[in-house]
Amino acid sequence: MKIRRLLVKEFKETRVQGVVFAAVLVVFGASSVLLQKFIPQLVPENLAEAFQPSLTAGLADYVGNSLQMGSIVAILITIAALAGERESGTLELLLARPVSKTQIVLSKFFARVSYVFLGNLIAGLVTWYYAVYLFESFPLSKVLLAVVGLTVVISFVVGLTMIFSAWSRSKISAAFGSGAVALALAILPTVKSPYDMISPFTYGEVARQSLLGEVTVTGYLSDLGAIIGFTAFCIVLTIMIFRKVEKIT
């Protein structure tokens, strides 16, 4: 069984997770611009003047909410990738087929990254529609750059969670492990630590910066490259751990 057939299997078994991911990003991310427009109507009259609708604020909220909620859902849809199959006993059946452990890991990773990209693309297009319809003309190209940036950052979270899913015997332990490490890495850039460069989230600002026009082409590509490097390391480590754990068992 080649990786293409493994991917088809993953898409069939996890398509509901992809729908959930996209729905969460649309509700919590794309609706940020919509809420910005109608905030004055949602708060008491004496506070309405303090909440002036702002497209810039709405777009910033879109990136922040998409990154936060997207990362949480990415962990939830990835913890079962290997730990869930091990927990249910279906992993043994999969390993009994003529496939390599590397192919198994890659198929599960790329299936979930596909959901991350499609979910961000849908949410990005909805955000762009709200921006143009409710506020003013806004370049679609900037939204698409932000979509790519968000996809790359959240794909790192998928890769990080794959490590714990490969190691853990249960989905709960994989969720706690990956969630704790992801939270620590997300906090690191905010405390002005000399070690913040080891956190992929340090480069995650590229999504917001590309949307609001505060990044150069060189800076955009170098930041994305750094995050992709972290993600590749996670996948290599996942494969190594998966091979070792399954060899022991």
Image (cartoon, grey):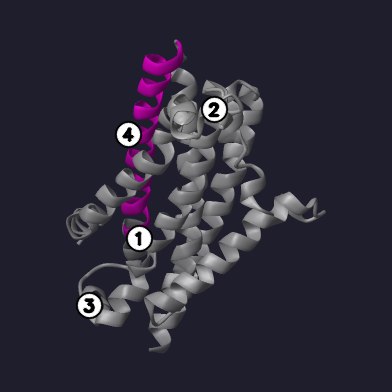
Label 4–label 3 contact, CB within 8 A:
no
Position of 21 relative to 213 (above/below): below
Question: From mark 2 to mark 4, how far is it between C-alphas?
Answer: 31 Å
Mark 4 element type: helix
Q: Which residue is mark 4?
A: 122
* Nearest-to-viewer mark from 1 and 2: 2
Magenta stretch: residue 131 in it? yes
How far apart are the alpha carbons under marks 4 and 3?
32 Å
Q: Secondary structure at mark 3?
A: helix
Q: Residue at x 60, y 34 (%)?
A: 206
With respect to residue 122, does 197 lie above or below? Answer: below
Can see residue 248?
Answer: yes
Q: Earlier in the sequence, mark 1 or mark 2?
A: 2
What amino acid is at disc 4?
Ile
Where on the picture, by quarter, is residue 51? Answer: top right
Between 114 and 201, the one nearer to me in the picture: 201
Residue position for label 2: 48
